[in-house]
Image: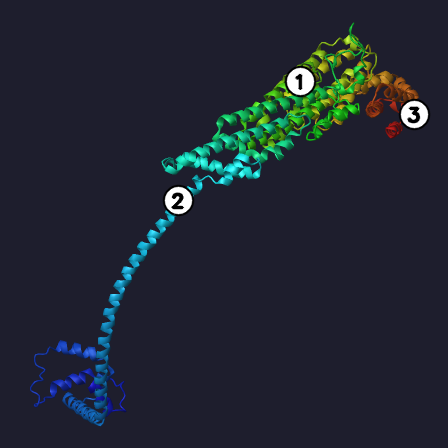
Amino acid sequence: MAEVAANNANHPNETSKNVFDFGAFVGDLIVEEDDSSDDISLEGLQLEGLQRELEECKDDDVVANILSKGVKLREYTKGVENNLRKVELDSIQDYIKESDNLVSLHDQIHDCDSILSQMETLLSGFQVEIGSISSDIKILQEKSMDMGLKLNNRKMAESKLAKFVEDIIVPPKMVDIIVDGEVNDEYMRTLDILSKKLKFVEVDPMVKASKALKDVQPELEKLRQKAVSKVFDFIVQKLQALRKPKTNIQILQQNVLLKYKYVISFLKEHSKEVHLEVRAAYIDTMNKVLSAHFRAYIQALEKLQLDIATSNDLIGVETRSTGLFSRGREPLKNRSAVFALGERLNVLKEIDQPALIPHIAEASSLKYPYEVLFRSLHKLLMDTATSEYLFCDEFFGEESIFYEIFTGPFAVIDEHFNSILPNCYDAIGLMLMIRIVHQHQLIMSRRRVPCLDSYLDKVNIALWPRFKMVFDMHVSSLRNANVKLLWEDDIHPHYVMRRYAEFTASLIHLNVVYGDGQLDLNMERLRMAVDDLLMKLAKMFSKPKLQIVFLINNCDMTISVLKEAGSEGGKLQLHFEEMLKSNTGLFVEELLMEHFSDLIKFVKTRASEDPNASTERPISVQEVEPIVKDFGSRWKGAIELMHKDVITSFSNFLCGMEILRAALTQLLLYYTRLSDCIKRINGGAALNKDLVSISSIMYEIRKYSRTF
């Protein structure tokens, strides 16, 4: 690098990008000989090695610049040595000029060494002292940890000892309250403290082995006995208050007894015998009190009962027949409450209303069907049972006590119900009671109180067989009915059919929400029985026309009643609509045959024949002319007679008008076919003057339609 620097100094203006001529340089090495250099010889060097070294230096700009100028190596070396020697001499001169400064620097360095040596000695002493202090700190730290551990152990021992003393000691104030204090909130708190002390000395085995217990235990036992005796007397006194007449049991339970529910827990834990005695006393008290209340309430309700039906109040029973010893009764067909639902449905709408207050209803001289009394009784039962169930669960901490208390009330209600049910022949009332029970089950479910589940199931199971029996009695009354006694020479709706329609509509309405398939099957049985009876009654009329009118009137009345009950008639309503339609067609034919028999017979037998066909008896003008003239002379009068006949025959004006319009429409069709037949007869044009125009007949039909 010194050679490169020297070369650059000698040739500052030379460019470093001259081209390197490798061949010329090699040629110079071979031809040129230098006698002054005995050490340098190219002999023994392999040409390949030299070429490789030159190839490696070929890309260096300085080397390439030197070689490209053709300078001899020896001369170039001497130049570099001279430059180095000059630089060395210059450096010596610089050192000579700075000799004073260097001496001063040397002295300063020597002084620093002395100071640093002193510092080293001082720091070494500090290090020794710090090592000694660290050892002392470790000793102090160990002593501190040991003292801290001892302190924690003493604190733990102190806290346990303090808790032990607090738990086992019997303060004088507690003794005074337990022995002489009144049973109140403070007494309850003191009782809780006593309970904890009793548990403490009984549970912990270390406490049982302590000497302190021997001094305290007798006092604790005396306090326990005193507390048990005192709270027992207190609870018994409160239970006696439940037996007093006109006592509001729920208020006494909620406002008084629940405040002292801890007494029961205390007795249960520290005196099981007394606890069982209190429990038995409460069960006996509430059993008798509630039984007496329900018995009095049932007796008051029985005075409000309105008798609806007896064993003779059946659909197929003849109203005019009375037994030899039977008392006179108003006709069943006027006693619609037996079969019609009417306002009796309100009992389901008022399902959650308060129970009846008997003396108020009795003062107003009100009477109610039994299902109203049934709902009221069970509403009172639900509310009482819910209150008692929740109280027993909270006060005694057990649900089973409820069922022991209510054995009495259940027995009283069952006795009443078992006396009523066998004498109940009111199928509508029975179905209402079944629905009431279902609604009450839903109410108890929403309250999440299961105490009446089994009871309500039992009542439901008792009601269904009774309803089925009464329903079968209605079916049997229709199947075994005496047609001669039931028949009345009256084409208007029969009272048996009205009973059936109202009875069926009532049951359908009560089954809408529930969709009871078994009830649907029973109503189908009832429908088949009433169909048979209706046909038997119709056959009692001598004329077919009267039979048809009787059937139409009864079907129309039944459909109307079913529609009034709602849109839930279903198959039953469809059956009577089809029956009405078929009988309406028969009546139309009977009515037209009565007034236009010749016309109808001709149209049915001859109108479809071809007058020009070669037959034994072709249709002629002479055969048709009397029919045309007869119709033209009296068709208006006949229609008026038909109108009067319909008005007098059918109870339902709208139904009668529909039938009249159907008859007139059918008459128009018959006459149109007659007119078409005349047009095909040879010489039939001669009858045109006697034919009534279709427009005239249409005008007459529209006139009666306007009346409709």
Position of 220 relative to 607 (above/below): below
Return the disc, 1 or 2, that comes first in the chain's sequence.
2
Q: What type is the residue that disc 3 sits on?
A: Lys
Q: Residue at x 27, y 66 (%)?
A: 133
Q: Residue at x 10, y 82 (%)?
A: 42
Q: What type is the residue that disc 2 sits on?
A: Leu
In the picture, residue 105 is in which quadrant?
Answer: bottom left
Q: CA distance from mark 3 to mark 1?
A: 86 Å
Q: Nearer the viewer, mark 1 or mark 2?
A: 2
**Can I make out residue 571 in this image?**
no
Q: CA distance from mark 2 to mark 3?
A: 136 Å
Q: Residues within 10 Å of mark 1 (few under 14, many from 20)?
A: some
What x and y, as percent, mark residue 226?
51, 31
> Are discs 3 and 1 less than 8 Å apart at CB?
no
Q: What type is the residue that disc 1 sits on?
A: His
Please name the residue that numbered disc 1 is placed on. Answer: 416
What x and y, as percent, mark residue 247?
67, 28
Q: CA distance from mark 1 to mark 2?
A: 67 Å
Please name the residue that numbered disc 3 is placed on. Answer: 689
Return the disc, 3 or 1, that comes first in the chain's sequence.
1
User: Label for residue 161?
Assistant: 2
> Which secondary structure, mark 2?
helix
In the picture, residue 202 is in which quadrant?
Answer: top left
